[in-house]
Amino acid sequence: MNEFLLEKYHDLLKDGAIAPELYDLYEVKKGLRNNNGTGVLVGLTKVSEVSGYNVENNVKLPKEGNLYYRGIDIKEVVKKSKDDFGYENTCFLLLFGHYPNDIESSIFRKILSDNYDLPEGFLENIILPHPSKSLMNHITRSILSLYSFDDNPDAIEGTELIKKGVSLIAKMPAIISYCLQAKTHYLDKDSLHIHFPKKEYSFAENVLYLSRNDGHFTDIEAKTLDRCLMVHADHGGGNNSAFVGTVVSSTLTDIYSMLSASLAALKGPRHGGANMAVQDMMSVIIDDIGINATDDEINNVIDRLLKKDYFDKSGLLYGIGHAIYTLSDPRCDILREEAKKLSEDKKSPKFDLYYRFEKLAIKKLEAKTGKKCCANVDFYSGLIYELLDIPRDLFIPIFAAARLVGWVSHDIENLLYCNKIVRPATKYVGFKED
């Protein structure tokens, strides 16, 4: 039977191939990208804006990158948190359109903390009995399962989406941590450590408290993770997972299904897993040339990477370059500073190597392509997670936990103001019988 299927598949490859030139003939935009590399406009939003270039005469012109949450630059959003935890205020900003005052912030934090806990029996009956080697699959299944614990799960009017969305955002530290503990215990054969969320803890503090066996963390660790959550909270309505959520929710399905679709999209290595690729690449480099490598040694490695003669032989410099940002990625600028401070606190020498690699890699890649480029958010986020002793299994789930608020915000906005099922078209170019 399998041989038959393989034979038919190879017949399909031979006889059913779509000629590449047909995409140009019918002006089909692969990946919803214009010929100049810009994205095809598919919606309007007031939630966030990603800006990394200008376009003049259909040509992309480099500029310093900006990320705006409801019109406020992400760097200013981070500054507003001062020395406190800012992710909760960031969630409020994305959901409600303005930065909260002290009273609004206090009330919203209370609402979040009141929703930290999972439904009774959920941990024992839904999460622990069904571990998965993929935490993202396990988290997605858990979100879908929460549908059954909702008295009115299919309600999608704005007020219902706000209540359900905030409840789900608040539950993410417990969900991602318990999915990790289930895998660690049942699949990796290690001890099971279960803590329960603390209402007095911030979102970031609960992530560290719940995911660590001893529950211990320092203030700088929690504040650094908080900044990571803030910069990952949203990235415009056109990124893959946000757009997937828009497509799915446009059918008027429930919020649990919408979020599960976005989670599935984020799991893909082209979207959510890039920081792990950076860590893998840098680990190989450190093993080969050492933490105190010279610039010449680093340049030699970069040359080999670009020539597809090193690491995974893909020709890629992971963490360098971005589809939108050209001269700078503001998220990277923020996390670079956070990584530096955390490295000093941990007395780790890795930051210096990463920083020098970043600068040398940009020069090499610009010389090769003739285009301006920059390091992206993934270049330092993986290093931060490593310095925080966060297991690799949690890298993408933490991204997902941070991004949930963005998906919910775009979902509400699209249902309120667009509210039309997403239905693009394709052109049939196959065989037709007479």
Image (tube, grey):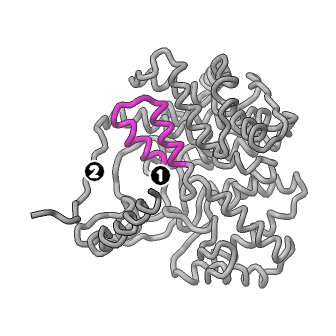
Depth check, front residue: 389 or 184: 184
**Main secondary structure of the magenta stretch:** helix
Q: Amino acid at mark 1?
A: Asn
The image position of residue 72, as x and y in percent, is 54, 44
Magenta range: 241-266
Residue neighbourhood size for the residue with mark 1, other residues' Cα within 10 Å, grouped as few (<14), some (14–19), many (≥20): some
Q: Is residue 298 left or right of residue 155?
A: right
Spatial separation of the CA atoms under disc 1 and disc 2: 17 Å
> Up-down: is 68 above or below 376?
above
Q: Looking at the image, is mark 1 or mark 2 earlier in the sequence?
A: 1
- For label 1, the residue is 239
- The disc at residue 96 is none
- Residue 182 lies in magenta, yes or no? no
The image position of residue 43, as x and y in percent, is 35, 47
The image position of residue 16, as x and y in percent, is 30, 67
Residue in the image at 35% along x and 68% along y: 11
Q: Is residue 100 left or right of residue 258?
A: right
Depth check, front residue: 324 or 128: 128
Residue 99 is at least partly visible in this image: no
Residue neighbourhood size for the residue with mark 2, other residues' Cα within 10 Å, grouped as few (<14), some (14–19), many (≥20): few
> Up-down: is 75 above or below 350?
above
Residue in the image at 65% along x and 37% along y: 87
**Which is in the foreground here, disc 1 or disc 2?**
2
- For label 2, the residue is 424
Question: What secondary structure is marked by label 2?
Answer: loop
